Amino acid sequence: MSNEQANNCCGDNAHGQFQKLDQILTEYQDQKGALIPVLQEAQNIYGYLSKEVIDRIGKKMAIPTSQIYGVATFYSQFHLKARGRNIIRVCQGTACHVRDAKTILRALEDNLKISAGETTTDRKFTLETVACIGACGLAPVLMVNDDTHGRLTPEAIPDILARYL
Amino acid sequence: MELVKVTIDGRQIEVAKTTTVLEAIQKAGIKIPTLCYHPELRPEGACRVCMVEVEGARSLVASCVYPVSQGMVVRTNTAAVREARRMVVELLLANHPKDCFTCARNLNCELQTIAADLGLRGIRFEGKRKSIPIDANNPSLVREQEKCILCGRCIRACSERQGVHVYSFVKRGFNTNVAPAFEVGLDKAPCTFCGQCATVCPTAAIVEKDDTREVWQAISDSTKHVVVQTAPAVRVALGEALGMGPGSVVTGKMVAALRNLGFNRVFDTDFTADLTIMEEGYEFISRLNNGGKLPMITSCSPGWVNFVEIMYPELLGHLSTAKSPQQMFGALVKTYYAEKSGIKPQDIVSVAIMPCTAKKAEAAREEMDSTGCGPDVDFVLTTRELARMIKEAGIDFSSLTAEQFDAPLGISTGAGVIFGATGGVMEAALRTVVEVVTGKELDCLEFHAVRGLNGVKEAEIPVGDLKVKLAVTHTLSNARKLLDKINSGDADYHFIEIMACPGGCIGGGGQPYASCGDIRQKRLNSIYECDQCSSLRKSHENPAVKELYDTWLGKPLGEKSYQILHTHYHPQQRG
């Protein structure tokens, strides 16, 4: 997804920004239990589930928005805030923890000027913590999108970030 | 109906095959604790307090969601059941604030009662607490999530009973809470402030906004003249909150208690209920004769008015423009009564005792200011709040001698009092409309077709040459059915009465707790008993209303009436 798309969905031109969503909604029309697949596809289009998108899904599927919001906040796969172009997942698992993963997280937060769970204002990065990414031998470790960066020190962080600017 | 035999604690009983274990236990006359269960809502099995032993089952079962079967053997009082029950309650208490002393539901809390019944003398665990800000950003309801035990009764009341769907469980695990979509405050959610969530909440997670401090302050301010009005449904429910049986009629004791509390004048909303009938009745006749928008729909239930403004703004033209009795009363107190008694409106504090939480929001509406010097109704107290004030003042309510309302705004008819029950406004209107249109006296004043607790009641009543088609409904999920019919063009009614709460105001969001079917029926019977005992039973025969028109207002729908007693509605963009 692109930032343009994410931004567009806040406008009020129903034909423009909701065209793809409406197509999906038509596909799943009258199908019981279709909410989760619809939310997944909507998130694929817009990158996250905005209030406007949830409202539209609620209206078209005749499901109260409170219920949709309940479902969307239950599953960690759904995001309610715009996400960055690059997703940083910094490991806080046991192996990373004992090798001082906290200082890596702090270095990321200082460099990006955001806290874990947030997105930079330029939407370039979203910072998330994860429990383990299964690369304990490389601890402390983080992933940017599909790239793994291991044996980290706080000093290495600015260089890593620079590669994704 | 297929019956099955089940044995409960050694006693054999026969129940329908569709019964749950809990219902069978109750039928056997055994009381076990429940929290998430509510007799009028779909069972959920969330709290596990009602767990019992079922022979052959792998573990204890939540009886509220477990169906009975032929030959089932149930035990409700074994060591394992008692231990599990205590553990469930202890774990609930581990995360619960321990401020029972100062809690709004102290001595009136289901969780507290269960802890007491189980004889808990200590809580072995100290759990984390939720820290979600208190939502008190609206005039009616306060939500304190720290006190929520996640039983989901509010969610079900709002969805099943009201069809409004404000709440849902959001997030998960320890972070689960109950919230409107996007976790906004109720003022930003499509909430009608009907307060049904508060009536079913077992703890103080949802309560009415308490305005008793402000009212005490007004009463003790010697420069203020404090007048009070009491809604019809309060007199048949207040007793319950003060140790009397359901359905006790306590009109006279209530008046005496209000005088004891220090109100300068004790008036009756029934007076303006009669006046509402005059204005709304004439409005209906005028709509019939002049091709106005039909069906006309009543507008005295503020939860219902909010519902239309939020969900069906396209139908606002169907609402009667007559203000509700509370607001007519407020407007008259600050104009007519101020003039008559020679007291400046700014020195009058007008208080309303209502069975309703939405009335608080109604009083706060900007347009409800007839004099330009503040709200027509300064404070609205629910029945529950009045009961608390009476207790605080140390009044021995049940031994009070009955007293009469003050004149003139305390004079009313039986037509006014039945406003408190579903169908009452319709019946009161018919008593007046039929007599005004035909010029003949009615033989029978009771319109049984519009009475009772059925969801949607329909009738055809001859009014002169015309057969007037009527519908009466209560709860907002039933209202939705009627509105959808209007929108699809399938409704040919002339007049519809809609009340937001089950049974009408007698089941309002501000009434004493434990409002359920039996209790509502008793309150309802008492309302009609009050009507039956009234010497006058038609609004247009109320002498104080006649005098008001003769000496001050002019005529129904006249210029002055229109200015003071009518209002307008506007779409609300929320949620």
Image (spheres, rainbow, N blue to C red):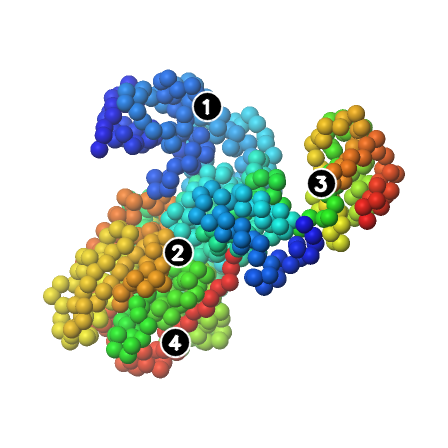
Q: Is residue B564 above or below residue A69?
A: below
Name the quadrant containing residue B466: bottom left
List x then y, in percent, for residue B545.
27, 73
Where, quadrant-wise, is the N terminus of chain B in this rendering?
A: top left
Question: As drawn, which residue projects farthest toward the left?
Answer: B443
Work out how far the residue at label 1 is from the one at label 2, CA to CA, in angstroms: 38 Å
Residue hosting label 1: B84
Nearer-N-terminus badge (4/2): 2
Q: Are marks 4 and 1 in contact (CB under 8 Å)?
A: no
Q: Nearer the viewer, mark 2 or mark 3?
A: 3
Say if labels 2 and 3 share a chain.
Answer: no
Q: Are marks 4 and 2 in contact (CB under 8 Å)?
A: no
Mark identifier at residue A128: 3
List x then y, in percent, for residue A60.
48, 54
Q: Secondary structure at mark 4?
A: helix
Amino acid identity at mark 1: Ala
Give the residue at x 87% y 38%: A156
- Near mark 3 (Cα within 10 A), the count class, few <14, some 14-19 or many ≥20, is some
Nearer-N-terminus badge (4/1): 1
Work out how far the residue at label 2 is from the one at label 3, CA to CA, in angstroms: 46 Å
Amino acid identity at mark 3: Glu
Q: Nearer the viewer, mark 3 or mark 1?
A: 3
Nearer-N-terminus badge (1/2): 1
**Residue A114 as seen in the image, left or right of residue B565:** right
Residue hosting label 2: B356
Residue situated in front as seen by the camera: B464 or B142: B464
**Residue A23 as seen in the image, left or right of residue A122:** left
Residue situated in front as seen by the camera: B121 or B316: B316
- Near mark 1 (Cα within 10 A), the count class, few <14, some 14-19 or many ≥20, is some
Give the residue at x 46% y 33%: B47
